[in-house]
Image (cartoon, helix red, strand yellow):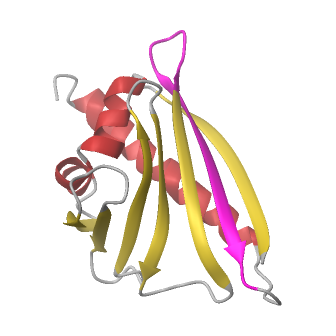
């Protein structure tokens, strides 16, 4: 099995504690509210929200991707770190065994965050994967965090 690792980081004008809370702890209620044009629902289908929990994210119609299932691997509230694996999707990249996403939110001097994300794509033997698609997925995640940023800038007391 091969491994492709993609690392990216981007700044978000939201403090790490707030960003961690919305993305890692209150995903099911806040993310569909912040991104109703993309995410129809997010719900825990197994577990209590900690490591081992399975979450299903359902997307709005017309996006191609209709759902994904994620397994929470780690939650570190003290260090604002979170990881999950993508375990199921209606659109799965051929040749991919699994994907693990690791996030860490680091404070900036201005009061915002740097989101550091590592994506690990475990590739089936003999399969070829286009790294451009992996980079495109990383840009979509940055867009999600920019939507969270816009929401909190428009609703600072939220």
Residue positioned 60% across, 57% down in the render? 138
Q: What's the magenta region? A: 106-124
Q: Nearer the viewer, residue 12 or 81?
A: 81
Q: Nearer the viewer, residue 120 or 115?
A: 120
Q: Position of residue 39 (x, y in %)?
A: 28, 65
Instruction: Locate the N terminus and report the quarter of the image it occupies.
Output: bottom right
Q: Position of residue 116 (x, y in %)?
A: 60, 38
Instruction: Locate the C terminus and report the quarter of the image it occupies.
Output: top left
Quadrant position of residue 125: bottom right
Determine the main secondary structure of the stretch shown in magenta: strand
Residue positioned 42% across, 87% down in the render? 90
* Residue 108 located within the stretch drawn in magenta: yes
* Residue 61 located within the stretch drawn in magenta: no
Q: Is residue 37 above or below residue 147?
A: below
Left/right placement of residue 84 relative to residue 22 reads right
The extreme top residue here reads 109
């Amino acid at each position: 099995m091969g491994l492709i690792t993609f690392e990216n980081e981007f700044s978000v004008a939201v403090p790490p504690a707030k960003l961690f809370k919305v993305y890692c702890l209150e995903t099911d209620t806040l993310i569909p509210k912040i991104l109703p044009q993309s995410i129809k629902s997010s719900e825990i289908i197994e577990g209590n929200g900690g490591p081992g929990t399975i979450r299903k994210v359902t997307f709005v119609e017309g996006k191609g991707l209709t759902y994904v299932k994620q397994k929470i691997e780690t939650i570190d509230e003290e260090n604002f770190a979170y990881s999950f694996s993508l375990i199921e999707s209606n659109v799965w990249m051929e040749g991919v065994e699994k994907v693990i996403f690791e996030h860490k939110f680091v404070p900036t001097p201005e009061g915002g965050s740097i989101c550091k994300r590592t994506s690990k794509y475990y590739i089936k033997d003999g399969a070829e994967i286009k790294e451009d698609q992996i980079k495109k997925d990383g840009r979509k995640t940055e867009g999600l965090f920019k939507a969270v940023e816009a929401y909190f800038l428009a609703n600072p007391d939220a």
